[in-house]
Image (spheres, helix red, strand yellow):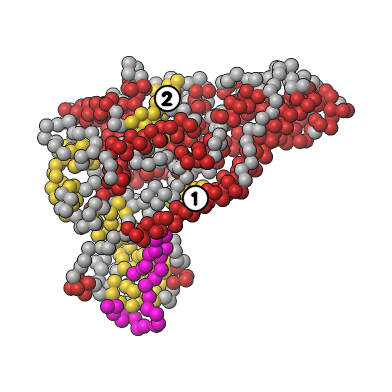
Amino acid sequence: MTYTDKEKKFKRFTVTTALPYANGPIHIGHMAGVYIPADIYCRYLRMMGEEVLFIGGSDEHGVPVTIRAKKEGCTPQDVVDRYHNIIKKSFEEFGTSFDIYSRTTSNIHQKTASDFFLKLYNEGKFIEQTSKQYYDEQEQTFLADRYITGTCPICGNERAYGDQCESCGSSLNATDLINPKSALSGNVPVLKETKHWFLPLNDYESFLKEWILENHKEWKTNVYGQCKSWLDNGLQPRAVTRDLDWGIKVPLKDAEGKVLYVWFDAPIGYISNTIEYDKDNWEKWWKQKDTKLVHFIGKDNIVFHCIVFPSMLKAAGDYILPENVPANEFLNLEGDKISTSRNWAVWLNEYLEDFPNKQDVLKYVLCANAPETKDNDFTWKDFQTRNNSELVAILGNFVNRTIVLTHKYFNGKVPAKNELNELDKQTIEEIKLYPEKIGTLIENYKFRDALFEMMNLARLGNKYLTENEPWKTFKTDIKRTETVLNISLQICANLAILMEPFVQFSAKKLQQMLNLNSLKWFEAGNCELLKVGQEIQPAELLFERIEDADIQKQLNKLEASKKANAINNAEVTPQKPNVSFEDFSAMDIRVGTILEAEKVTKTKKLLKLTIDTGIDKRTIVSGIAEYFSPEEIIGKQVSVLVNLAPKNLKGIESQGMILMAENADGELCFVEPQKQFKNGSTIK
């Protein structure tokens, strides 16, 4: 029984983690956002004696897989086979405690997903619709959302995808994009009719409102808020099939060339992986009401796990629904968004090669820096500082001093606990509080705070040992030295238990030094874990200092990626299709002066500009706030496309566009006259 589930008394826990696309290795953003918190949660539950199934697996049917295959000139199956094995091995070496890590190309998954679709189809839960979708006439194929790029209507990012803008994070439909282009040919796609099956999410709107908005107000603010926004705006039917040749074939006679849409296919992977793991008893993990289902995901998956998948489960009729979906925000790297395509990442498999036997250091730093409530930033300097100043100087130092002194003064045997003074009694009382304090935080998905409390126990030990100075009292009051080292050793033993969910390799090492068997969570909190006279092993360093040279090597690697990306972008950015002189002449570009500028509320990138175009004074919304402050651009002359059709951006009607130059690093600068020109002068 857990601390906060005493009333509900769940008998078992089904814990899932978002399935990573098998189109590249795992990076630290994935680990910080999903897999480390999930692993901490499951390790803790197991130590509490709970029955837990921890599920992971590779998502192998996403469009990113086909993009990677096309880029590498191989088949999608080649791609997923390679990266599934890399990802699985990385998780194993990192110590992520999955009960099963499988894949969506398995035969079991194909059957499970097909059967799930057919059940809903046969029960009339889908609607059949003919709709217009983008089609590449040159490639003669319908385009998946990720194969369509264009300008985001929200922030003006010119490299948004048909399903999402990675710059502002907005979810999009491909038809929302301004100036859409096919990622396959670079041509402008056309809209063409095609038939698909849809899940009418609007039919589940009232159920979702009651289930989430009324019954799950305890969910994290970012999760609850995003769900509320979707529900307040009204839900629409969502296609469950797609025109693609890579994926699970739609199991119907009249569905040639169609596959299950990846958002429908992938979450069923949680169920198929359970069947693969526990074929005879899988239903207890998914259909019994005394099972608690928890999804660990990143914020880009909230809608699928809180709106779409629960609607699928509700439609199927006899499945449990998630009790919580503790989604995290994003982790940036050295102040920049992690990007697979730009190789701006710290890959888990490369980290394990560069820092052998230092899994716990990365796990600690990523948990301490976890983007639980807002986007956070990983830097190599912070990684070094946290290792050297916290793991080495606080936790490792306390354990090492205690064990070294025990061997020096008492031949490596636990000394007696004699008469206690007030500081001893106070310290013992404080130790009692930590198991429940840390456990409650973990159960409430506050892993960063829980880690901080675990380190507070090490700080308590360091303070206690330093203030009592057993190296001084040994010659004058040996009984006092015995008591101080006994209590210090008991703190070490408590740490050996309470560290395990966070830094399991180091916890095991400490347990071996203390000759402790693996203990349960509730055994922590007392000062009788080690018996008087019990032998302990000589001290070994739990953590080692990380030197400047190690960090500089990683910074150099990132700098090389940045330079290579800039060169590659310069080499491969294709010329846009030719336009006629008449088309160019149709654009009315004028010199204008910025009169006023202010940030658009609740956005990071948008500025609202008032510009004198010589024709009039008009409002233009521009996505340049990350590069220019309002104050520095007032009075600047700019180039303005004045006859661009008005567009509503965040409730503001934008009447034109200012022209900007962008380099390979994404930096912007104004296209402006070299000397002062009269407003309204034409640019030809």
Element type at mark 1: helix
Q: In the image, is residue 386 above or below residue 50?
A: below
Query: Where, by quadrant of the figure, is residue 668 drawn?
Result: bottom left
Seen as rendered, the residue at the extreme right is 476
Where 135 sits versus 659, above or below?
above
Residue 205 at what x, y percent from top left?
27, 38
Q: Quadrant of residue 368?
A: top right
Pick whichever, 302 or 26, lies toward us: 26
Question: In the picture, which quadrant includes the C terminus?
Answer: bottom left
Q: Look at the image and say whether residue 680 sits in the magenta stretch.
A: yes
N-terminal of the pair, mark 1 or mark 2, is 2
Q: Nearer the viewer, residue 81 or 13?
A: 81
Q: Of 372 and 255, which appears nearest the observer?
A: 255
Q: Give the range drawn in magenta.
A: 659-684
Q: As shown in the figure, which amino acid type bears the numbered disc 2?
A: Asp
At a point 83% along the width and 23% down the height, the residue shown is 479
Which amino acid type is shown beneath numbered disc 1?
Lys
Which class describes the residues within 10 Å of circle 1: few (<14), some (14-19), or many (20+)? few
Classify 199 as above or below 377: above
Residue at 30 percent across and 58 percent down: it is 151
- Is disc 2 placed on a helix, strand or loop? loop
Q: Which residue is at a point 18% across and 73% down the rendered structure image?
A: 582
Q: In this view, does 381 lie to the left or right of 238?
A: right
Horizontal arrangement in the rendering, residue 79 relative to residue 492 (left or right): left
Residues at marks 1 and 2, CA–CA distance in whole angstroms: 34 Å
Residue sitting at the far front: 73
- Which label number is shown at residue 99? 2
Question: Measured from the top left, where is residue 32 in percent x and y?
Answer: 47, 40
Percent across and percent down for residue 44 are 52, 27
- Residue 100 in view in this figure: yes
Give the crowd class for mark 2: few <14, some 14-19, many >=20 residues within 10 Å. Answer: some
Q: Name the residue under label 1.
A: 557
